[in-house]
Amino acid sequence: EAGVAQSPRYKIIEKRQSVAFWCNPISGHATLYWYQQILGQGPKLLIQFQNNGVVDDSQLPKDRFSAERLKGVDSTLKIQPAKLEDSAVYLCASSSQDRHYGYTFGSGTRLTVV
Amino acid sequence: LAKTTQPISMDSYEGQEVNITCSHNNIATNDYITWYQQFPSQGPRFIIQGYKTKVTNEVASLFIPADRKSSTLSLPRVSLSDTAVYYCLVGGDRDDKIIFGKGTRLHILP
């Protein structure tokens, strides 16, 4: 079974620029999550999708972050404009309806804002 | 969502059994306990999940007392490659989001 695919693997941008991350979840997984992980901390949930609908985006800084999941499969997370404090690893995870096998995470995109 | 408390860091030696305990005093009736492992530059990886008593798989064992207010992840005969951050999480419903704490940094010494 293929895992959760994320790209790019690394990204360096200047502050105030925009950036987008892409995630392809495991086939058949209805639920998709985006997490932000700052160095030395645990992952922080940004947004949760169920198919192509948003379940929870309470922690998403909506003035600069946006996410979409068209057709309930792939998802993109965008930051515009980026700030220095956005430097982090952005992780995508997916899960099936049966949560008893946990979430499957991708390897993440490491963003550095300079 | 139940909050979890676990040690910030632990050291052990190769070949030893390592036990990491997590406290979750406010665990709800329908909550499961799940442990993840995270290596540098990788996303967290599911290790084991349980509801009560004991669960064992090819990687670890999970011990949960009757009151379910804590749980212990047991890693048998650790090796250097088990050096990682281990997260304990609780959650239940299918739509329930999982919240990560700071985890336990396990360092295995030769």
Image (cartoon, coloured by chain):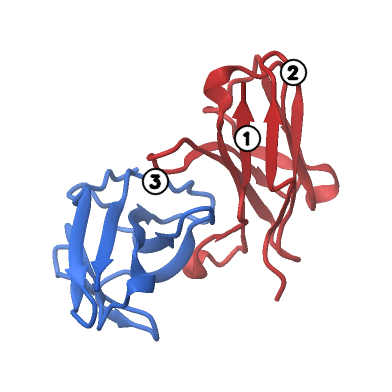
Chain colours: A red, B blue
Residue B16 position, x and y percent, is: 18, 79
Say which of A64 and A107 sits in front. A107
How far apart are the alpha carbons under marks 1 and 3? 20 Å
Picture residue at 48% right of the left edge, 46% below the top? B97
- In the picture of the structure, the residue carrying the numbered disc 2 is A17
- In the picture of the structure, the residue carrying the numbered disc 1 is A111
Q: What amino acid type should be assigned to the residue bearing mark 1?
A: Leu
Quarter location, residue B88: bottom left
Say which of B51 and B60 sits in front. B60
Residue farthest front in this picture: B110
Q: Are marks 1 and 3 on the same chain?
A: no
Q: What amino acid type should be assigned to the residue bearing mark 2?
A: Gln
The quarter of the image holding the N terminus of chain A is bottom right
Q: Is residue A63 above or below residue B46?
A: above
Residue A41 position, x and y percent, is: 39, 39
Say which of B33 and A112 sits in front. A112
- State which mark lies toward you, 3 or 2: 2
How far apart are the alpha carbons under marks 3 and 2? 29 Å
Which label was assigned to residue A52?
none
Secondary structure beneath dot 2 equals loop
Q: Are marks 3 and 2 on the same chain?
A: no
Residue B68 position, x and y percent, is: 19, 62
Task: Determine whether label 3 and label 2 are within 8 Å by CB.
Answer: no
Q: Is residue B83 above or below residue B87?
A: below
- Local packing at callout 3 (Cα closer than 10 Å; few below 14, some 14-19, many 20+) is some
- In the picture of the structure, the residue carrying the numbered disc 3 is B100
The chain ID associated with circle 3 is B
Q: What amino acid type should be assigned to the residue bearing mark 3?
A: Phe
Picture residue at 62% right of the left edge, 56% below the top? A106
